[in-house]
């Protein structure tokens, strides 16, 4: 029923958690706390299921809550113990084959389960807020590493590094200050840093997003839209945002050589980038046919297993040196990733 407040009718809904317990002569205060805890868990289950409903507690809810708490504690311990590491996937200039950059990708070296990919821990890190300190560590570590390559590896001075910013990290009030501090402490040229955000993030609180992007651009870094084509951005939005790079989602690349519709979509993104004076990066290139077609379409850069899998710093440094020695030393061209390459592929990661 509507509730009349002043001159307005307010309609309210409720999410209700229901728990029950038997009252006995031996019931204690602890039993009362458990009953309230169970009702609270059921209430959150009602909210998660869409709100405006009632949910009855069952034991699985408590088991899930305990599991989530243990997982969070493990993440906190791993971050404090330095168990996370950064792998890097090369990004190449498609026409020349030149290695021009790397994308930083976080991994967890779990003491019992081995090397874990981001799908196993990033969602929980997002949910718990630990993605903010974890993302800051990835930003600092990858900038430090690439700055070292700039200093120590011949002809690597223009290598750029792409770093993903999660939605929660992007909305963190201290983001711009954190990025500025990392740039200053690492000594990296800001123009060699690309910060990647998802297309869906652009649609959240648009004015605040534009303001943050302009502040980041003022530091000298570049901005890329990751997984472009999977969200809902319109041309009018793209024109408003200070964007430098569009990354074409792997979903459009997988069948580009066999499905004319996917090829048309990829070409449309490339042409859109060209019209807006943006660079384009194709993700997930795995075959020579995909490489040839994307290059013919005018796509600027690409990354994928055809060139190299994500790998640790030592392997990437070897690739950087291989890239320098595989062609003309003056411009670094040459298919260092081709069949004749001396560096073996990195293990799956």
Image (spheres, grey):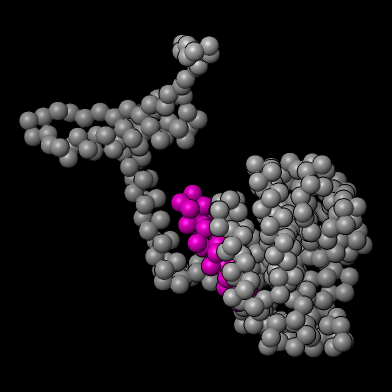
Whether the magenta-drawn stretch holds residue 1 is answered as no
The answer to which of 166 and 21 lies nearer the viewer is 166
The answer to which of 219 and 75 lies nearer the viewer is 219
Whether the magenta-drawn stretch holds residue 133 is answered as yes
Question: In which quadrant of the rendered image does the C terminus lie?
Answer: bottom right
Quadrant for residue 285, please give it: bottom right
Range of the magenta residues?
119-144
Q: Position of residue 222 (x, y in %)?
A: 74, 63
Q: How many marks?
A: 0
- What main secondary structure does the magenta stretch of the protein show? helix
Quadrant for residue 219, please give it: bottom right
Asked if one can make out residue 313 in the rendered structure from this viewpoint, the answer is yes
Q: Is residue 158 left or right of residue 327?
A: left
Q: Position of residue 229 (x, y in %)?
A: 76, 47
The answer to which of 73 and 60 lies nearer the viewer is 73
Q: Residue at x 68, y 88 (%)?
A: 152
Q: Residue at x 78, y 82 (%)?
A: 323
Q: Position of residue 191 (x, y in %)?
A: 74, 70
237 shown above or below 69: above
In this view, the residue farthest toward the left is 25
Q: Position of residue 27 (x, y in %)?
A: 12, 34
Q: Residue at x 50, y 62 (%)?
A: 133
The answer to which of 111 and 105 lies nearer the viewer is 105
Q: Residue at x 24, y 34 (%)?
A: 35
30 shown above or below 96: above
Asked if one can make out residue 90 in the rendered structure from this viewpoint, the answer is no
């Amino acid at each position: 029923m509507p509730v009349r407040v002043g001159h307005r009718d307010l309609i309210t809904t409720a999410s209700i958690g229901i728990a029950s317990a038997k009252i006995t002569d031996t019931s204690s205060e602890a039993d009362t706390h458990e009953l309230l805890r169970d009702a609270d868990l059921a209430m959150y289950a009602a909210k998660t299921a869409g709100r405006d409903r009632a949910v009855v507690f069952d034991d699985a809810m408590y088991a899930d809550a305990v599991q989530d708490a243990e997982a969070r504690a493990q993440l906190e311990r791993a971050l404090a113990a330095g168990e996370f590491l950064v792998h890097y996937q090369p990004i190449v200039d498609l026409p020349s084959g030149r290695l021009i950059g790397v994308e930083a990708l976080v991994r967890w070296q779990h003491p019992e389960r081995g090397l874990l990919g981001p799908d196993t821990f990033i969602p929980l890190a997002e949910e718990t807020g630990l993605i903010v300190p974890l993302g800051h560590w990835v930003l600092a570590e990858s900038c430090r590493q690439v700055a070292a390559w700039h200093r120590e590896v011949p002809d690597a001075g223009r290598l750029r590094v792409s770093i993903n910013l999660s939605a929660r990290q992007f909305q963190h009030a201290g983001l711009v200050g954190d990025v500025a501090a990392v740039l200053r402490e690492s000594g990296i040229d800001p123009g060699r840093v690309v910060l990647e955000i998802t297309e869906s993030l652009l649609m959240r609180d648009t004015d605040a997003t534009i303001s943050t992007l302009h502040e980041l651009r003022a530091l000298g870094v570049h901005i890329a839209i990751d997984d472009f084509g999977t969200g809902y951005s319109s041309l009018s939005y793209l024109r408003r945002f200070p964007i430098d790079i569009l990354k074409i989602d792997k979903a459009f690349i997988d069948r580009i050589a066999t499905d004319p519709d996917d090829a048309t979509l990829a070409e449309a993104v490339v042409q859109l980038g060209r019209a807006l004076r943006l660079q384009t990066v194709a993700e997930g290139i795995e075959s020579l046919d995909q490489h040839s077609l994307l290059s013919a379409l005018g796509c600027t850069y690409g990354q994928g297993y055809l060139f190299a899998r994500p790998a640790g710093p030592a392997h990437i440094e070897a690739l950087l040196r291989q890239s320098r020695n595989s062609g003309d030393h003056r411009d670094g061209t040459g298919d260092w990733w081709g069949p004749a390459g001396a560096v073996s592929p990195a293990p799956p990661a």
